[in-house]
Image (cartoon, coloured by chain):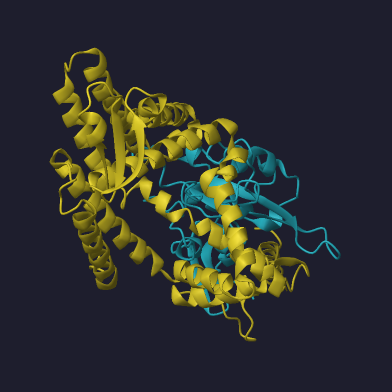
Amino acid sequence: MEITSYKTEMEFFVDMQRCIGCKACEMACAECETNGHESMIHVNYVERAVTIQTTVQVCMHCDDPVCAKVCPADAISKDGFGVVHSANTARCIGCSNCVMACPFGVPIKEEKYDMMMKCNMCYDRTSAGKKPMCATVCPSQALFYGTREEISRMRPNSTPVNSFVFGEQVVNTKVNIMMPKGSTQLKVH
Amino acid sequence: MHSLNRKAALIAIIVTLGCVVISFYGSRKLQNFDPALIAYLFGTLFALFGGIYRYCVWLQRPPTWMYFTRTWQMVFTGNFFVHAWFMLGDAVRNLLLQRFIYPRGNKRWLAHFLLAWGCLAAFAITIPLTLGWINFTLDPATALDPGATKLYNANFFGFKVMDFKLGSVMAFLIFHALTWCSWAVIAGAVIFLVRRLTNAGLIASQTFEGDLLPLILLIIISVTGLGLNFSYAFMKGIAYDFMSVTHAIAVILFLVWIPFGKFFHIIQRPAQIGAHIYKLEGKKRGMAVCPHTHQEFTTQLHVDDLKTVTKQVGFDFTLEDGSSHLDYSPEGKRSLLAMAHLKARQESGSFFG
């Protein structure tokens, strides 16, 4: 993990309004070596009874990850690039604290392994300077991995936002969500 | 640098001193203590001190303490014997057989099983030997009779617990117990090492000191340990000193490292049983229903405890109406985020930009 070609100028940009629910990202995610070929991305209907709207969710890689703080086994760590890694397999006790505490609903408890797993931004690829699998296949660019210059050229009327308000709590993240131009935060409730 | 955790240090000192006292009297005032093992003794005592210290620091973390206290509350609430039976079964499945690893890969399970049992059996033999708790003596009656088959006594705290004939199958198995452990550890460690050197996902995320060095250390310990036996059995003692010093250095490094490195998971693993009891008992008390999906998603106890724990670690997900973001299921949370995003886009007058 020490010697990498991780490109710090590259960032992840998500625009869930562009998600068409094709699930190509789910298939691509299962190609990730660091996930052990388990798909960790979430695509779900927002409110199936009333709308066909779908949403896509990758790990937001929080600056101060609550999943790591509530882990009773010290199994989750954040590296120098700000990537919050999936649970250390030797330590995770499968308690699901991280699953239930993550404000974005990201970690998955794999019951068959009695272990938590989550998106680690395709670390096998990003640490080698490549793009995460999901971002390479998304046909509508709901998921985009590139530089700030690239995204500002592509989305001139949007602003990347990485600050989210959940009631009393503000959560800052490494991953951005594309919001209307000039936005600084996304208030969830 | 983190400041010293006084409570943990105090407990660790008391336990370590307790071990020294037990070992002093257990070895019959050092009569049964083997001075050749003095370096191992200090390594063992350091590992004990460090292990207890880190365990106590670890327990003091809010989420760990919550699980620890809840587990024991639950065990001693209601029918203790039902809980004890469950814990015993869970310990056999998860600690003795490590069955949770099997679905992750049968080769991984086999490697871990060999490695774990090789290490644990070796601990069970070498630690009491190092502390002078067990020793072997030649039975005085048979020793003096030239015509009698020599009997060997195994003593625990100076009390005879068993005897066996020299040259018997039992003697062969007992005297070579560490050899069997070494072969098991080597087999397990080599399978893991090959996996770590060939699996692209592991190559990307592992560290040398965290993942490879522990395996290399275990292999060095086992190979030099076997080498000691091989040297006096087949090589007339050639290279015995080299093997013995290399073995000692590797073992002491291993012991000193237990509290800080990968090996600490051996001490952490029983917490998994606590997590299972917590889930089981929580279900009996009632499930939480997500206000968005209207589906059960975890126990209400889990949600309530997480509200407390998140506040203890510096997060407050309380909403304006007094409810909490933590009342929502993972799917509910993802949907809420998407709905908030849609609303922001709608208010801006354009869905895309």
Residue at x 58%, y 72% (from the top left corner): B74
- Give me the chain that's cyan: A
Instruction: Say left or right for B40 vs B62.
Output: left
Residue at x 24%, y 70% (from the top left corner): B10
Can residue B169 be seen at all in this image of the molecule? yes
Q: Residue furthest bottom?
A: B321
Q: Nearer the viewer, residue B40 or A149?
A: B40
Determine whether B232 is above or below B139 in the image: above
Determine whether B184 is above or below B262 in the image: above
Give the image quarter of residue B121.
top left
Instruction: Say left or right for B168 vs A27.
Output: left
- Give me the chain that's yellow: B
Q: Which quarter of the rendered picture does the C terminus of chain B lie within?
A: bottom right
Give the image quarter of residue B19.
bottom left
Determine whether A87 is above or below B82 in the image: above
Q: Position of residue A31 (x, y in %)?
A: 61, 35
Q: Position of residue A87 (x, y in %)?
A: 50, 51
